[in-house]
Image (spheres, helix red, strand yellow):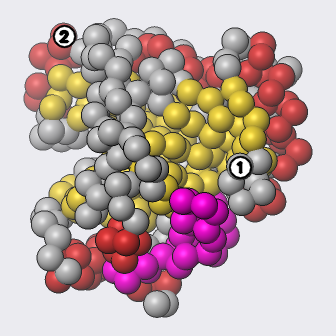
Amino acid sequence: MSQAESVLGIHHVTAIASDPQRNIDFYTGVLGLRMVKVTVNFDDPTTYHLYYGDEVGHPGTILTFFPWPGAPRGRHGTGQLTVTSFSIPEGAVDYWKRHFREHGITFKETDRKFDEQVLSFADPDGLKLELIASPEAGSREAWKDGPIPVEYGVRGFRGVTLLEEGYERTARLLSDTLGFRQVGEDDNRFRFEAGEDGLGTFVDVVCPPTVPRGLVSAGTIHHVAWRTADDEQQRAWRTRIAGVGLDVTPVIDRKYFHSIYFREPGGVLFEIATDAPGFTVDEPVQELGSALVLPPWLEPLRNDIQKALPPVRLAAVVRAAE
């Protein structure tokens, strides 16, 4: 397939959290991501939708959350995206080990995946995360005004891991329909890639022998979105996906991108999202994530929505040398 006939990699990953303030403090203060948008779940305006990424929230850097205050922990299992992996520069691993120790973050260092240097850890809700040292990380800039020195900062996604009861149907969708290429195999882990630069382009499909079905709640992933360049290509994707017998939604306006949704054969919720228009359509770059932003159709309900949302502190994070 040509680039136009394959997805371009990861657009964003959306997860479930419990306490929104704890979530904000961890992802901005510990991981050093920028809060690029504070809005609400357009399908449930009583719930925040928090977006973290690089300075402007480029596709491929965006991790988002629906915080459900008081929600119990979910269960990691099959039919889920279970691990979200970020890219860091090859020389940054020692910095991050020291940084995690100083913040009381438990982590594990491993070379288990295709000889990559990996730091595995979890957020306060138990969401499984990785930092992976990659030579490609130098081609993308970290957020320069965050708490992490820019030379060590997170460079967006490296990839994601899907846990599946079976391999074949998901693999067929990835390769035959979405345009991924299988680029590696290690025991029961199968690696696929879309795009060329190694940043946000990998998906690992893991088939464990005895793992129960996952349950979505706090600390689990809700869905993963794949990138497409524009509305025309998205319409083509919708036709192609419907053509292989999957139930795909109409195009939905998410204000910062346009989306279609469908479940892959193993049960993971997939989205295909457009790169444009991006997060600066309603806030200048310097003010991203500094206040609650609502879409025009919810603006008349702002007072009621604000009363329903728990208060959070959105003070700017100041870079601190370590």
39 over 3 or under it: above or below: above
Query: Furthest-front residue in view?
Result: 209
Callout 1 touching callout 2 (CB < 8 Å): no
Mark earlier in primary sequence (1, 2): 1
Specify few, some or many for label 1: CA neighbours under 10 Å numbering under 14, 14-19, or 20 or more. Answer: few
Q: Is residue 168 magenta?
A: no
Q: Residue at x 87, y 33 (%)?
A: 94
Q: Position of residue 228 (x, y in %)?
A: 40, 70
Q: Start and end of the magenta stretch? A: 174-199
Question: Residue 126: x percent and y percent?
Answer: 48, 24
**Relative depth, front residue between 239 and 126:** 126
Q: Nearer the viewer, residue 39 or 178?
A: 178
The residue at which mark 2 appears reads as: 307
Identify which amino acid the numbered label 2 is placed on. Lys
* Residue on which the image places disc 1: 112
From the viewer's side, name the closer residue of 225 and 36: 225
Q: Please name the residue shown 53% across and 24% down the image.
A: 123
Q: Position of residue 200 (x, y in %)?
A: 57, 59
Residue at image location 84% in from the left, 49% down from the top: 90
